[in-house]
Image (tube, coloured by chain):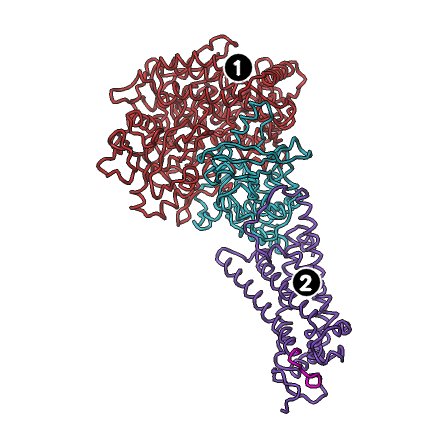
């Protein structure tokens, strides 16, 4: 089958870009990224610059890949990343528009590559439990009910791809931030830092230039790992509690 | 207080402020609607209710102050969040961007919000201040329109307003906008305040839909009824107190029917 | 080449404690004066960087990804072993040690493996404290599953995303230390060479992948945590960017490279579907707990699986290995699959595959129970192939997955270059000739959290702290070499992409140095590889410039190193005249076709020394001594 990829080409950060069409012969078993590989091989053969795009594991877990494909983050298919999209999901003759994530907090570096370091900085602000290597008690000393452990896992499944930001009408990182905050805030190990974590993560998210949540649910609808919207409700509640009720670990004096 | 201000500094804090101020308005809208449903019980009941309310001046003024404060918080927060969100994506998608989930209610929040803000001003001018009489006089099917706005004659004033097709259209549009705003707003507020959990997610969606539906049906009932009465020729002397009508049975009285 | 492994003396049970007592320690206030470079921030690198920083060292961490969270450790599915004995099934440190030495086919150091088993329990404690959401039972306690090569349930897991959860735990620990200022993170930097001053590792030269700038970074010690070289096969389950450059460059600077021919072929991967295939996907080995492997009894049977009656199916693992059945170690399972396909019993028309069938388990436990355990793996399989494993058996085939070989390290994890350390998959130490399932995560975290942070002190305590002279002539020399290599790549004006050569190399090595090897094929490969290298330098085309994000350039550099490295790997396979673990020489097998070791001549680690371009590398031996687990022929029957 034959399709045309209309790909955003942009030479560098801050520069202007435009769409360019690449007609290409494909077979249904090919993954979307393999189609980009084929186009790139042809470009290299013509001594033209290949399309820059991020990818690594190609099995939907590293979170490197991602682009807007025909107006949908990560392209067609529920709960999948761009590398998991296959050409059997398209039809012969399709025009496929491929564009990088758009958000001020994700500046375009080149073509489809954007800078997502802002997500790292949110985690660095407090997306962890402060435990020093070697200081942990026995792992079974603290039983955690299966439903709670499972819910924490659901939140922990985030791959940091940024699709939630890309799909959000406000370019908000609420789902990303809430997934990490809620995973740790639910677990008993995370209680000590629950309030400081909620505050630090939200303030960093705001400062990084992500938008706010308007509860449209676009993020959860395209999340490749199916992280539920209620993560955001959990974060909201933790933040309000943190600010209004205060920290449970606060010095009683 | 400091905690509240620091909370408000964050986007989530502003959303919480919007949720709470919005909740004030949801309460007000429901209360206002319940009061106005007295319209269906006739001029006497409605006017009596209105007069009783007027007698509770401190409550009325306290309520107005609260509403004003909630409005300021709601609108200021909304604009400040919109500004923040617009900065979050200065360069939009150059190709298509298809929403997967967003419904019309969510999409129209900010436009609906502005429309409702304008409507509030119109509504106060119309039925609180009563300064739109000349406008209502232009086209009006209510026979008593010539009397203009009469302070205290709530039933008459409502007929005056609903008898005007322009005014009626504004009311119908505003109620629809309000209902849409609440459909997303109520659920959104619940989510923002963190009440929405797995077990209650669909419940809250239903509650939001129920409130939106109630507000739509309830608040459309009296403008439409009022317009129908006006069309069918309600006599102003049957409506305005002091002309001897003690009870109005909510059925339009034919102009010349001897009772 | 000095191959003193600095093994501790005394009974193995106390060796690690005794060793920690004996090695030098840097005093706490002095630690901040030492700079340590950690290259690679996967499980091993991130955990090491975080722990070194907690101890007070100044850490510079480097990753070629945009974020440490992308490292390929993230793709490990099945789990992590630990001798916790939470299942009360008789597990112990000794049993994990025993299984690992035996599973490695007696080609690993006993002392290293024993230490690994000892610290395994600390890893689980630490990861749970970090908030890693391991699977739990209804009583709230940790759940285990069994894995190939073991008779106990000691594998901790987080659905099919254990690697992800452990990596995120390490990433979060690293983030915490970045926040605290102890770690300076350099993302999107690729190591292009190691800098030695007076024979000691004193820094690295990296390329900023966004600006193309070549940077010099100095330190008192350098830790390589850059993973394995499985992508030498082109098609592997490794991530696309995984490469050998860091360890190969260290080898060229004098670090011994040990056992490069010990590569692991994972038995359960989604088979190759077409010529454009860029990467293979692994289906966790844990699936073999509930899946039965079979092929049709008759060669050339092309009926769909549902049409083949029980009596005409060959559950060959259960038939050949009744004790372990479907849970035989990876190398055994992989070779058995290859034998079936070689006999013409492939279940993929025109391709190579065997069935992994869940029908019996679904009947016995119900679809919900299977979904609970493997739901995401089944979804992943369906996404790739379009087939649902709930309805029809999976098609699987072995693929390159992990490399046991790596830089030679002593008990302190130091390479033959003083001050240069290698941890995680990048070193060779703990898995011998075959790694057991769920042991890679264990080893990466053991090295990073619990071994290197202590052992590095032994070297640093003897070193003057605070080396930061990037103007030293050694840096200038290395940088000049790096520049000229980059220029050479850009100035070669051929017509072919680097991927073309990578694929060509991969096919050659898979054919001759893959699941089964023989002298003839290896000799042929050794003749072919230099030709590929020559053709590469004559015909490769790298568009774009050096001063920009240039993925074609990155790739070309990695492929060039793979080509050179492939030669050592093949040479190692050729000189190891025995079969052991993942290294199967067709000339050396039992009458039943199983691997036949030659302990008399090959009970050693083969360590290769670089002797200059165009010269044959020199082979050294580290003899292995087995005092606790006496070598025997591995039997899983």
**Both labels 1 and 2 in a single chain:** no
Marks 1/2: CA–CA distance: 73 Å
Q: What is the letter of the cyan chain?
A: A
How dense is the environment of label 2, judged by Cα within 10 Å: few (below 14), some, or many (20 and up)? some
Q: Nearer the viewer, residue A109 or B96?
A: B96
Position of A155 relative to B226 (above/below) = above
Query: Can residue C364 be spotted in the picture?
Result: yes
In this picture, which residue range is highlighted in magenta?
Answer: B230-240
How dense is the environment of label 1, judged by Cα within 10 Å: few (below 14), some, or many (20 and up)? some
Q: What is the letter of the red chain?
A: C
On the image, the x and y values in percent for residue C550 come to 60, 26
On the image, the x and y values in percent for residue B15 come to 64, 55
Q: Residue under label 2, please give it.
A: B116
Q: Residue under label 1, please give it.
A: C252
Q: Secondary structure at mark 1?
A: helix
Hey, which residue is sitting farthest front in the picture? A93
Q: Nearer the viewer, mark 1 or mark 2?
A: 2
Q: Is residue B233 magenta?
A: yes
Quarter occupied by residue C91:
top left
On the image, the x and y values in percent for residue C617 come to 47, 10
User: Would residue C339 be found to the left or right of residue B165 on screen?
Assistant: left
Position of C36 relative to B72 (above/below) = above
Q: Nearer the viewer, residue C185 or C575?
A: C575
Q: What is the letter of the purple chain?
A: B
User: Would residue A60 be found to the left or right of residue A214 on screen?
Assistant: left
């Amino acid at each position: 089958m034959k399709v045309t990829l209309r790909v955003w080409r942009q030479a560098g950060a801050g520069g202007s870009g435009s769409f360019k069409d690449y007609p290409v012969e494909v077979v249904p078993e090919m993954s979307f990224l393999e189609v980009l590989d084929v186009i790139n091989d042809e470009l290299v053969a013509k001594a033209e610059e290949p399309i820059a795009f991020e990818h690594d594991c190609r099995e939907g877990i590293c979170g490197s890949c991602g682009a807007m494909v025909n107006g949908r983050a990560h392209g067609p298919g529920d709960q999948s990343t761009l590398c998991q999209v296959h050409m059997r999901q398209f039809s012969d003759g399709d025009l496929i528009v491929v564009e990088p994530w758009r958000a001020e907090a994700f500046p375009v570096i080149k073509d489809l590559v954007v800078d997502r370091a802002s997500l790292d900085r949110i985690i660095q602000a407090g997306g962890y439990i402060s435990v020093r290597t070697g200081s942990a008690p026995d792992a079974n000393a603290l039983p955690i009910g299966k439903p709670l452990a499972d819910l924490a896992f659901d939140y922990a499944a985030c791959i940091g791809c940024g699709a939630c930001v890309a799909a959000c009408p406000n370019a908000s990182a609420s789902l990303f931030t809430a997934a990490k905050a809620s995973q740790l805030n639910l677990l008993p190990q995370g209680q000590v830092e629950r309030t400081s974590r909620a505050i630090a993560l939200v303030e960093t998210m705001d400062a990084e230039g992500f938008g706010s949540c308007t509860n449209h649910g676009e993020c959860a609808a395209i999340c490749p790992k199916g992280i539920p919207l209620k993560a955001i409700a959990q974060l909201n509640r933790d933040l309000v509690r943190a600010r209004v009720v205060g920290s449970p670990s606060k010095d009683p004096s | 207080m400091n905690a509240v201000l620091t909370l408000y500094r964050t986007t989530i804090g502003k959303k919480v402020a919007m949720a709470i101020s919005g909740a004030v308005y949801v309460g007000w809208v429901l209360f206002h609607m319940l009061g106005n449903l007295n319209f269906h019980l006739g001029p006497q009941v409605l006017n009596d209710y209105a007069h009783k309310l007027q007698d509770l001046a401190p409550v009325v003024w306290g309520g107005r102050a609260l509403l004003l404060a909630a409005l300021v918080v709601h609108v200021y927060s909304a604009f400040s969040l919109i500004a923040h969100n617009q900065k979050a994506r200065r360069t939009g998608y150059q190709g298509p961007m298809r929403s997967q989930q967003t419904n019309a209610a969510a999409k129209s929040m900010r436009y609906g919000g502005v429309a409702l803000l304008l409507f509030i001003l119109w509504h106060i001018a119309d039925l609180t201040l009563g300064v739109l009489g000349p406008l209502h006089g232009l086209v009006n099917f209510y026979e008593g329109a010539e009397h203009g706005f009469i302070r205290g004659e709530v039933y008459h004033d409502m007929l005056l307003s609903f008898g005007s097709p322009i005014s009626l259209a504004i009311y119908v549009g505003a109620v629809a906008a309000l209902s849409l705003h609440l459909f997303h707003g109520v659920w959104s507020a619940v989510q923002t305040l963190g009440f929405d959990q797995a077990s209650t997610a669909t419940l809250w969606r239903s509650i939001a839909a129920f409130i939106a539906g109630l507000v739509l049906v309830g608040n459309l009932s009296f403008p439409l009824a009022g317009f129908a009465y006006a069309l069918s020729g309600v006599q102003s002397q049957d409506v305005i107190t002091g002309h001897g009508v003690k009870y109005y049975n909510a059925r339009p009285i034919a102009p010349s029917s001897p009772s | 080449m000095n191959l003193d492994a600095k093994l501790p003396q005394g009974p193995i049970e106390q060796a690690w404690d005794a060793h920690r007592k004996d090695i030098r320690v840097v005093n706490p206030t002095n630690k901040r004066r030492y700079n340590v470079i950690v290259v690679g921030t996967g499980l091993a690198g991130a955990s090491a960087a975080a722990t070194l920083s907690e101890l007070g060292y100044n850490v510079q961490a480097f990753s070629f990804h945009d974020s440490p969270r992308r490292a390929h450790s993230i793709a490990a599915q099945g789990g992590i072993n630990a001798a916790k004995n939470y299942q009360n099934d008789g597990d112990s440190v000794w049993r994990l040690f025993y299984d690992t030495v035996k599973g490695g086919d007696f080609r690993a150091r006993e002392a290293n493996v024993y230490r690994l088993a000892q610290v395994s329990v600390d890893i689980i404690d630490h990861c749970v404290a970090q908030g890693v959401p391991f699977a739990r039972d209804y009583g709230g306690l940790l759940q285990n599953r069994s894995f190939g090569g073991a008779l106990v349930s000691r594998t901790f897991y987080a659905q099919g995303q254990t690697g992800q959860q452990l990596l995120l735990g390490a990433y979060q620990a690293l983030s915490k230390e970045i926040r605290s200022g102890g770690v300076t993170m350099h993302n999107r930097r690729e190591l292009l060479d190691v800098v030695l001053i007076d024979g000691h590792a004193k820094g690295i030269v990296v390329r900023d992948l966004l600006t193309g700038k070549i940077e010099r970074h100095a330190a008192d010690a350098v830790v390589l945590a850059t993973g394995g070289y499985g992508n030498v096969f082109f098609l592997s389950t490794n991530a696309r960017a995984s490469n050998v450059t860091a360890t190969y460059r260290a080898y060229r600077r004098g670090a011994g490279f040990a056992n490069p021919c010990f590569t692991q072929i994972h038995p359960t991967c989604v088979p190759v579907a077409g010529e454009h295939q860029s990467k293979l996907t692994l289906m966790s080995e844990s699936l073999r707990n509930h899946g039965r492997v079979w092929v049709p009894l008759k060669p050339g049977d092309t009926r769909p699986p549902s049409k083949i009656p029980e009596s005409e199916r060959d559950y060959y693992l259960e038939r050949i290995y009744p004790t372990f059945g479907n849970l035989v170690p990876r190398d055994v399972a992989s070779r058995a699959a290859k034998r079936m396909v070689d006999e013409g019993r492939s279940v993929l028309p025109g391709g190579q595959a065997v069935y992994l069938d869940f029908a019996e388990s679904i009947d016995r436990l119900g679809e919900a129970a299977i979904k609970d355990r493997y739901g995401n793996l089944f979804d992943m399989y369906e996404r790739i192939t379009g087939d649902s494993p709930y309805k029809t058996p999976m098609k699987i085939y072995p693929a390159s997955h992990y490399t046991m070989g790596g830089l030679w390290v002593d008990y302190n994890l130091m390479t033959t270059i003083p001050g240069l350390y290698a941890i995680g998959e990048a070193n060779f130490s703990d898995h011998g000739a075959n790694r057991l399932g769920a042991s890679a995560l264990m080893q990466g975290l053991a090295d990073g959290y619990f071994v290197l942070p202590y052992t590095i002190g032994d070297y640093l305590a003897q070193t003057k702290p605070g080396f930061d002279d990037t103007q030293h002539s050694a840096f200038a020399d290395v940088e000049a070499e790096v520049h000229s290599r980059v220029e050479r790549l850009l100035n070669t004006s051929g017509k072919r992409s680097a991927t073309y050569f990578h694929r060509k190399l991969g096919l050659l090595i898979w054919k001759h140095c893959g699941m089964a090897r023989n002298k003839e094929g290896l000799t042929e490969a050794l003749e072919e590889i230099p030709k590929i290298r020559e053709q590469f330098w004559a015909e490769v085309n790298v568009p774009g410039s050096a001063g920009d994000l240039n993925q074609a350039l990155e790739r070309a550099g990695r492929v060039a190193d793979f080509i050179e490295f492939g030669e050592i790997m093949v040479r190692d396979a050729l000189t190891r005249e025995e079969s052991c673990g993942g290294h199967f020489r067709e000339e050396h097998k039992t009458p039943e076709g199983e691997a036949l070791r030659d302990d008399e001549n090959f009970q050693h680690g083969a360590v290769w020394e670089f002797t200059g371009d165009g010269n044959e590398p020199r082979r050294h031996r580290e003899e292995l001594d087995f005092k606790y687990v006496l070598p025997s022929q591995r039997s899983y029957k």
